[in-house]
Amino acid sequence: MSRAARRPAVLALAAAAALAAAAARAAEDAPARFRVLSGERWGYLDASGRIAIAPQFERADDFSGGLAAVKRGPTFGYVDATGRLALVPAQAPAGYLHRRFVDGRAVVRSGGRDGAIDRTGKLVIPARFISIDDFSDGHALACDDEACGWIDVDGRRVMGPAGMGGTAFRGGVATGWLAMGMGRKRAFLHRLGRGQLPDEYEDTGGFSEGLVAVRLGNRWGVVDGDGAPRIPLRFAWVGDFSEGLAAAREDRVLCGYVDKAGAFVIPPRFRECGPFSGGLARVDLATEELGAPSVGFVDHEGKPVVVGARADPPFDSALDFAGGLAAVGVGGPVFTVAPEAPSGPLLGYVDRTGRYVWKPTR
């Protein structure tokens, strides 16, 4: 091919790259949006609780990378923060809706196989995989006819194997599962640039804040990204670290929060413990003696800041805080809210003080 013939192709590639970069920058600056159900249609709120995108969608997902997957009539596509239909992929959704954009890629389905598009809608990873998980840290777990392992954003296999699946990369570390059964796995840590680390575990959590919880001999402890022990194997369970703390159980009844040395900063007194986000963690405030579940949020000292039973109206389920708000459910789990379930729970949003910015509706 002559230099003159190559020039249009080079310019086209440069233009596509510039367009993708501009879209990524716009996504970073996009205002927060929150799904809300009104009647039988989904719309979106802004962070103050005002309608930002009028309810008009039969299905809608949360925003990711400045776009949200929606279905309106026969169209499956993505809207931006203004509600404009920004992208309608040529391929079918790889799920109930199109998958979320992460690291500039969204998984799509074509001919019964998974591939991935960029933000312009171009199929940049051919649809040749049996499955592809969402990207994280520039990599995704993918399975083809031969094996499972991790691919980069161009679809090149860069690490494996993970015959029975695994976790997403976080901070350059992921877990691969080589066998599963009887509640136990053969789990190995993989580190970018080093490959599979030597130790084997029965299970692991996700790598976060330089640490990962691991199980061995039916007890949980914590190792760092090189596999070196940091907290002894003495817990019944340890969650992922967030904001310097991890949920943990000494037995199978109550949970609290430990620091990175393994010391309880918040003693075990909750039935369920979620990760910290925005300075608050979602917990079940009830103990065995108190009976019925009681959802709420505590601060880093374990003090209840938001209590579902005290809200007006009271809520009995919640998701973690994101973007300054938490989705809450009245009359059932938040994740079951759907227009197809007219007698299901109501969906609302509270701020970090527990004040409703959107009263529960459906």
Image (spheres, grey):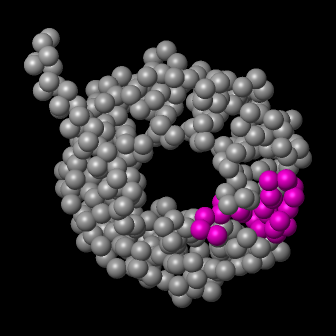
Q: Is residue 31 left or right of residue 286?
A: left
| Residue 294 position by quadrant | bottom right
**Count of numbered badges drawn on the protein:** 0
Visible in this render: residue 165? yes
Q: Is residue 160 left or right of residue 110?
A: right
**Residue 294 or residue 128, whichever sits in front:** 128
Q: Is residue 251 magenta?
A: yes
Q: Quadrant of the C terminus?
A: bottom left
25 relative to 355, above or below: above
Q: Residue at x 12, y 27 (%)?
A: 8
Q: Is residue 66 magenta?
A: no
Q: Quadrant of the N terminus?
A: top left
Q: Residue at x 75, y 78 (%)?
A: 303
Residue 139 position in % (x across, y down): 49, 34
**Residue 294 or residue 9, whichever sits in front:** 9
Q: Is residue 20 left or right of residue 211?
A: left
Residue 319 position in % (x across, y down): 55, 65
Residue 167 position in % (x across, y down): 59, 37
96 relative to 9, above or below: below
Farthest residue, direction top:
1
Residue 223 position in % (x across, y down): 78, 40
| Residue 291 position by quadrant | bottom right
**Residue 307 or residue 106, whichever sits in front:** 106
Farthest residue, direction front:
3
What is the span of residues highlighted in magenta in the rendered image? Answer: 250-279
Q: Residue at x 31, y 39 (%)?
A: 118
Visible in this render: residue 96? no
Q: Residue at x 76, y 65 (%)?
A: 271
176 relative to 272, above or below: above
